[in-house]
Image (cartoon, grey):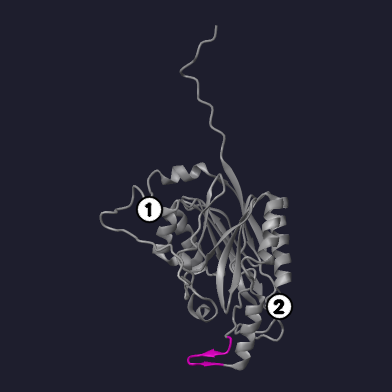
Amino acid sequence: MTTSNPDAATPPAARRTVTAAVVQAAAPLFDTPAALRRAEELLREAVQERGAEVVVLPEAFLGGYPKGLDFGITVGSRTPAGREVFRRYHAAAIDVPGPEVDALAALTSELGCHAVVGAVERRGGSLYCVALFFGPDGYLGLHRKLMPTAAERYLWGQGDGSTLPVVDTGTARLGSAICWENYMPLFRTAMYAKGVDLWCAPTVDDRDAWQATMRHIALEGRCFVLSACQYLRRDGLPADLHPVQGDGPDTVLIGGGSVIVSPLGEVLAGPLRDGEGILTAELDLDELGRARFDFDPVGHYARPDVFTLRVDTSAHAAVIDE
């Protein structure tokens, strides 16, 4: 005869975990085949050698971030030399869909991982800074940066509300904000409402102040934050270009600072400085529920009777055929 013991401890439930990686690196500017090879190498290393299931690559990894270049711009004037630099930049961007997207989709299918990859998308005569989403099923969609910052505005167009995806991996929900989009409170609120668990922040912001922003978003959104920053030196640019930081080959143009943060603001890995590398952390997904116990910015800690947000998720095209 078997009797139950009401005082016996209930065995703990199995932990739900995801191993995440953020990659800190850069690819040669104006060399798209080399950038793609580098992205593939880094994804393989993160998954096969570090055990990552979710990998984030920095802002504009494919297509490049031309730190320190002015493209011959002054107010009311463009130079022929600057136009030629832009032509090269436009030629190095990628089409979506296109061969680079197909190659990365095949790789994540092979590896069985999810990835968020920063890129520069070419769409007609315009360029967009984007985050590309991939998974075991291949290419899953993109997010176009809503608001290019400062001089980025003469390089990149503005995205619209039609590309604000949140991807369900089956264990967690991935969303992305690119660089200074992370400072947009209404953007963050809209993404929180989509139930983001893993907030992916591809960036080139290497300032110490960025770390406070990443911890704030983790606490505000009660989500894990995965921030991947570029590390770029002068020798990553073609020799005929002259960034304002100087022409010494070891001159650091983008200094990194990649970091992984928990939903209660604890730094789990990083910040990584002074070189390339891959940070990994095992994310306990049960921390999401624990963190949301006392704060949900679009739920029990919201005041919809006082504040509401309307989000236009429609696409806005310059020409509509009817």
> Which amino acid type is shown beneath numbered disc 2?
Asp
Residue 60: horizontal and vertical position, in percent?
A: 60, 70
Which residue appears at 55% of the width and 6% of the height? 1
State which region is magenta.
Answer: 71-78
Residue 286: horizontal and vertical position, in percent?
A: 50, 41
- Mark 2–mark 1 distance (CA, rounded to whole Å): 44 Å
Q: Quadrant of residue 306?
A: bottom left
Question: In the picture provided, is 294 more to the left or to the right than 158?
Answer: left
Q: Residue 235's mark? A: 2
Q: Quadrant of residue 257?
A: bottom right
Which residue appears at 64% of the width and 61% of the height? 23
Residue 127: horizontal and vertical position, in percent?
A: 57, 75
Question: In the picture provided, is 284 more to the left or to the right than 305?
Answer: right
Answer whether residue 75 is magenta in the image: yes
Query: 210 or 288: nearer the eye?
Result: 288
- Which residue is labeled 1 in the image? 297
